[in-house]
Amino acid sequence: MHNLKVNVMEQNFEGAFGLSLPSINIFLVAKVDQIMIFDSDTYKAIDKIPIKLLESMSREPNEVIGMTKSKCE
């Protein structure tokens, strides 16, 4: 049975996570050191927000690990 999923971007989003903001018709995707903003209808990238991270003090690189939204979005 086909569930009609189709790739809309060639970029690898493994390890990334998203946050939907339906009141403004966008969703955010956090990946390592940036937050990408996409249109919810077209899935086209609108903008990027670079996040300046501290230098890692261990072998694991620092990265964005969480996002949240207010109750009023």
Image (spheres, rainbow, N blue to C red):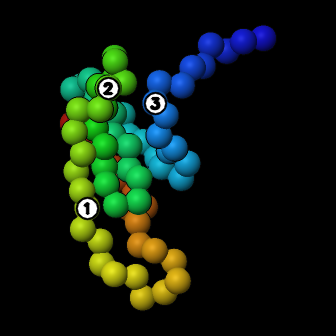
Element under disc 2: loop
Task: Determine the residue located farthest toward the bottom in the rendered image.
Answer: 57
Picture coordinates of residue 42, whole percent (x, y): 34, 18
Q: CA distance from mark 2 to mark 1?
A: 21 Å
For image coordinates 54% across by 25% down, the residue present is: 7
Q: Are marks 2 and 3 in contact (CB under 8 Å)?
A: no
The C terminus, quarter of image: top left
The residue at the point 29 percent across, 32 percent down is 45
Visible residue check, residue 68: yes
Q: Secondary structure at mark 3?
A: loop
- Check disc 1 and give the amino acid type: Ile
Q: Nearer the viewer, residue 50 or 18?
A: 50
Amino acid residing under circle 3:
Met
Specify the amino acid type for callout 2: Lys
Residue where numbered disc 3 is placed? 9
Residue 61: x, y in percent?
A: 46, 74
Residue tagged 2: 44
**Residue that badge 1 annotates:** 51
**Residue at coordinates 41% horizontally, 53% vertically from top-left?**
31
Mark 3 Cα shell of 10 Å, populated few (<14), some (14-19), many (≥20): few
**Of marks 2 and 3, which one's residue comes earlier in the chain?**
3
Element carrying mark 1: loop
Q: Position of residue 58 (x, y in %)?
A: 49, 86
Sequence-wise, the earlier of marks 3 and 1 is: 3
Q: Mark 2 or 1 closer to N-term?
A: 2
**In the figure, is residue 55 to the left or right of 59?**
left
Q: Is residue 40 above or below residue 59?
A: above
